[in-house]
Amino acid sequence: MRAHPGTARRTVLAGSIALALLATAPAAHAHGDRPQTPRGSLVLVGGGLKDDNTQVYGEIIKRAGGATARIGVITAASVPESQDPHAGDPDLCSNSACNGAYYADLFRKHGAADAEWIPLDTDHVANADSDAVVARINSMSGFFFGGGDQYRYLTTLLHGDRHTDSKVLAAIRGKLAHGAVVAGSSAGAQIASGADMVSGGESYEGLRDGSAPGYYEDPARLAYIPEGGFGFLRSGLIDTHTGAYGREGRALRLAADTGHDRVYALEENTALVVDHPGTRREQLTVLGPNGVAVLDLRDAHAHTSASGWTLRGARYTYLTDKDQYDARTWAPRPAPGKRPLTPTSTEPVPANTDVFFSPADPDGTPYAWRTTARALAATRAQNTATATTFESGPRFEVTFRKTRSFSAWTGDGATAQTLIGMGISIAPR
């Protein structure tokens, strides 16, 4: 069985980036036009989208027209066939064409009338300005961007240092404005970002060293693209694979460094559905078995001393299946059927010595941050809990705190599922 495309923890893109090309004017759209106000929607998945996730595939297809849905699959974040040593093996291949066929087949199996790969990748950059490909785009009612490395989307669908739309991207932007759905998983969700799109990095190295603009061969280096991605969702930074790869730390550090006050931290096999993106009516809904964290830095303060970087006053909200969120008012709404959790446990929160699931820890476990936050929510024995990084030099400590406005919500009356407004601080120890 061929590995699921776009699920590696680290992807290193061949070649280098000239930082001078990134220090240009803010992103513009094709021919300098103003972006249109979207009437369509976004379905952004944190990676690891399973073949049998009928809830998420079904949502994309429904928003693309249901039984008449025509989905264009774009996998330019994958390596092209020319760089895949297994290109001729359908069980081992992992390139743009192979992955495109994989997703197109899945969409048809889940009920789309048609789905087809759009031939765009680093071997076919010219297709991004092909009128014939634009005509195919204009016949679609929905689009799905696959995983891999989000920088490849920039090099294939935007015009280099000008950061302007190719004809294909302009056409997709126009389709979104007129009601189409734009979906993506992993890198395909990251590319929806506005300014300061993350381009790589691990949490510990990010907390220790800070962030830097550009793209780096060192996959642990926290880096970002100042001009951002395609700008479909601008109300917060986007990060993906969050709990599975322990990326809460890098997301908080990048937001603090770049002056953003909100991050949408997407988890695997789970979608953040965005209605009316970019408008005052922007509404978000979570669909899937995991969740989406909203990291709130409006009242946060960061500083660096001789002992290391410190962040105080951040808030952590964790939304689960069918919860909603109003981007304008910052108001979460737990799903119908969920009710406030009254803690009954008197057990202390278990020790957590690897809060960011370090690649260096052979005994680490994914979703360690979420595990500590939920354990604190479920106990009445304590109002704060601490967890540390696996690495030292310095070792960072994360403090979770039940603020006065904190609440936990449950669907079964016993377990903490949705968390709203938990206080977060990070400091070197």
Image (tube, rainbow, N blue to C red):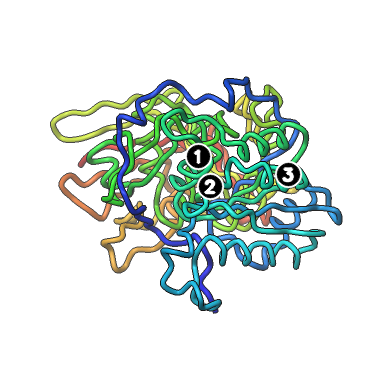
* Element marked by disc 2: strand
* Element marked by disc 3: helix
On screen, residue 326 versus residue 248, left or right, reads right
Q: Label 1, label 3: how many angstroms apart (C-alpha)?
A: 30 Å
Position of residue 142 relative to residue 351, above or below, is above
Residue 238 numbered tag: 1
On screen, residue 370 versus residue 10, left or right, reads right
Q: Residue at x 42, y 38 (%)?
A: 401
Nearer-the-camera pick, 162 or 376? 162
Q: Residue at x 48, y 60 (%)?
A: 80
State if disc 1 and disc 2 touch (CB < 8 Å).
Answer: yes
On screen, residue 299 versus residue 31, left or right, reads left
Q: Which residue is mark 3?
A: 135
The x, y position of residue 143, in whole percent, is: 68, 48
Could you tell me if residue 370 is visible in this image?
no
Q: Residue at x 42, y 52 (%)?
A: 372
Are there few (<14), some (14-19), or many (20+) residues within 10 Å of tag 1? many
Q: Which residue is mark 2?
A: 266
- State the image quarter where residue 24 is shown: top left
